[in-house]
């Protein structure tokens, strides 16, 4: 894409309503205050990486975006629809939001192809042949079409996580959420999953990814958000956040992450 085209695209993106909007969101587990006045907009087509120490609230934040967790105060809107107890609105949102978890959550008794076609057939009422063609297209994209007839137990962890990504894509979501998708994987399998996610980012998909993979954040993110103790402490372009941390909390986190790698 030329620089002028990128400028036009980013200007159009800036004019569009945010894909995700959080305004003064608070969440408690009993007396534990896990999200504190979190305000965040994610633009259409933006690739956002959320990082922070364990217990910082980042996974709770991403789970609140598709109401796997409920927030007690503040407003969350996804694709212009406010998250509430309205089940029809929630269904509408979940059709547009794909999610990939730490654990793969594949059905062990279904083949890879069946795992991928289940939701399009049942939720989107897609004819079986069309759903299977779509599933094969996405299995091709994540580079494991030859595994379609196998069962999850016959695949490596990295392959299962790539199936989980393909399965989410089969619903043709507008937004993809990733909750530490590589944390349960062996080191040699992390690379193949991150490569799949980099490829997905290059298609212009709106992505929110909770991860400790700083190399991925540098390569893919438009913006990095650093959370600690339930708050957004710093945010900005990856190079700015990683090279010039302004707070002691972020400096400490980065030193611990770099020490761990």
Image: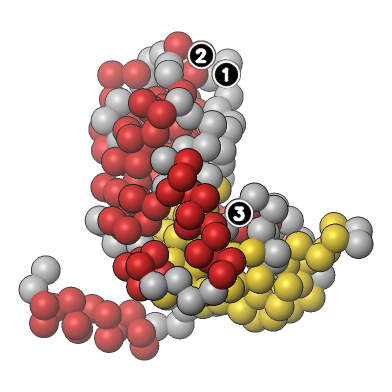
Which one is earlier in the sequence, the residue at label 3 or at label 2? 3
Q: Nearer the viewer, residue 54 or 144?
A: 54
- Residue at mark 3: 53
As measured in the structure, the alpha-carbon distance from the residue carrying label 1 to the one carrying label 3 is 32 Å
Residue drawn at 64 percent across, 64 percent down: 228
Q: Nearer the viewer, residue 77 or 177?
A: 177
Q: Around disc 2, counting alpha carbons within 10 Å, would you say few (fewer than 14), some (14 to 19), or many (20 or more)?
A: few
Judge depth for marks 1 and 3 and give the one in front.
3
Judge depth for marks 2 and 1 and give the one in front.
2
Q: In the image, which disc is placed on residue 108?
A: 1
- Percent across and percent down for residue 160 are 45, 26
- Percent across and percent down for residue 164 are 47, 35
Q: Nearer the viewer, residue 56 or 207?
A: 56
Q: Is residue 139 visible?
A: yes
Which one is earlier in the sequence, the residue at label 2 or at label 1? 1
- Residue at mark 2: 153
Tag 2 secondary structure: helix
Pointers 1 and 3 in contact (C-beta within 8 Å): no
Which one is earlier in the sequence, the residue at label 1 or at label 3? 3
């Amino acid at each position: 894409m030329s620089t002028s085209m990128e400028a036009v695209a980013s200007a159009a993106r800036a004019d569009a309503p945010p894909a995700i909007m959080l305004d003064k969101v608070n969440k408690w587990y009993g007396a534990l205050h896990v999200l504190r006045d979190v305000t965040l907009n994610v633009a259409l087509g933006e690739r956002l990486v959320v990082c922070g120490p364990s217990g910082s609230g980042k996974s709770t934040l991403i789970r609140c975006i598709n109401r796997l967790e409920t927030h007690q105060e503040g407003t969350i809107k996804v694709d212009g629809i406010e998250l509430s107890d309205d089940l029809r609105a929630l269904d509408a949102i979940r059709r547009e939001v794909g999610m990939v978890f730490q654990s793969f959550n594949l059905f062990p008794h279904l083949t890879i192809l069946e795992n991928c076609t289940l939701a399009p057939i049942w939720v989107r009422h897609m004819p079986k042949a069309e759903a299977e063609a779509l599933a094969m297209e996405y299995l091709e994209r994540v580079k494991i079409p030859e595994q379609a007839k196998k069962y999850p137990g016959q695949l490596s962890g990295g392959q299962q996580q790539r199936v989980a990504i393909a399965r989410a894509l089969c619903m043709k979501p507008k937004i993809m959420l990733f909750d530490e998708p590589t944390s349960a994987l062996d080191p040699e399998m992390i690379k193949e999953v991150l490569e799949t996610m980099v490829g997905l980012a290059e298609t212009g998909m709106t992505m929110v990814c909770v991860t400790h993979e700083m190399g991925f954040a540098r390569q893919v993110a438009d913006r990095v958000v650093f959370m600690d103790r339930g708050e957004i402490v710093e945010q900005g372009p990856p190079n700015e956040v990683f090279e010039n941390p302004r707070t002691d909390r972020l400096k400490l986190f980065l030193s611990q992450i770099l020490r761990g790698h």
